[in-house]
Amino acid sequence: MEPVPQDRPAPRTLLQVLCPESPRHFPWARPAQLVLRSLHIAAMALVLGAIPFGADFQALRVPILLTVATGALLFAIDLARDAAILTQGSGVAVVVKLALLGLGVLQPASRLPWYLAATLVASVGSHMPGAWRHFSFLQWKVIKHPD
């Protein structure tokens, strides 16, 4: 007697795992993002507001760490839903924001203009229309629509 072949789905590629056909849904993501985004904005406001007054890293240690931690968690949630965000308008805005922040770290004497530019990019990235937010620079079309 021969064994009956099992109908198994083909194994998924890494690209299929990272970039599912439709974004993953996590029921906890929306409330978590609300809390994280609020903390992120408040902490970032403390950092950005203190820089013109000459505050140093020691004075800003907690707000800086809170800004970095909340930003990383927000980005991780987006990437967990669909890593294809990195090729879309909203993900590109995040990468540009991180580059501007990096320039501020590398050029401490000029960090205020770099951080202000990063804040402007973040604001545009958060409030741009869905067609821009979900525009894929790889496929040169809108591939995801807002929920």
Image: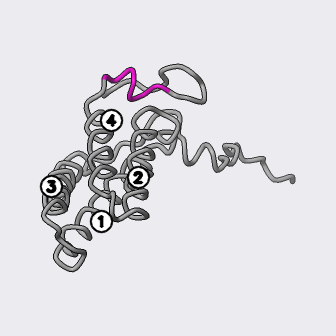
Nearer the observer, disc 1 or disc 2? 2
Mark sitting earlier along the chain (1/2):
1
Q: Kindly identify the residue that appears in the image at 29 percent across and 49 percent down.
A: 113
Please, what is the three-letter code of the amino acid marked with disc 4?
Answer: Gly
The residue indicated by pointer 4 is 125
Q: Kindly identify the residue that appears in the image at 31 percent across and 22 percent down.
A: 129
The residue indicated by pointer 1 is 69
Please, what is the three-letter code of the amino acid marked with disc 3?
Answer: Ala
- Pick the quarter of the image with the N terminus: bottom right
* Quadrant of the rendered image containing residue 81: top left
Residue 134 forms part of the magenta stretch: yes
Q: Dots 4 and 3: beta carbons under 8 Å?
A: no
Q: CA distance from mark 2 to mark 3?
A: 16 Å
Q: Dots 2 and 4: beta carbons under 8 Å?
A: no
Region in magenta: 129-135
Q: Kindly identify the residue that appears in the image at 35 percent across and 60 percent down.
A: 72
Please, what is the three-letter code of the amino acid marked with disc 1?
Answer: Ala
Q: Check disc 4: other Cα within 10 Å, few if <14, some if 14-19, many if 20+.
A: many
Residue 45, label in figure: 3
**Of all residues shown, which one is farthest toward the bottom?**
58
The residue indicated by pointer 2 is 98
Q: Dots 4 and 1: beta carbons under 8 Å?
A: no
Nearer the observer, disc 3 or disc 1? 3
Q: Check disc 3: other Cα within 10 Å, few if <14, some if 14-19, many if 20+.
A: some
Nearer the observer, disc 4 or disc 3? 3
Mark sitting earlier along the chain (4/1):
1
Instruction: State the image coordinates of residue 25 (x, y, percent, origin top left).
Output: 35, 42
Residue 43 forms part of the magenta stretch: no
Q: CA distance from mark 2 to mark 4?
A: 12 Å
Q: CA distance from mark 1 to mark 2?
A: 13 Å
Mark sitting earlier along the chain (3/1):
3
At numbered mark 2, what does the secondary structure look like: helix, strand or loop?
A: helix
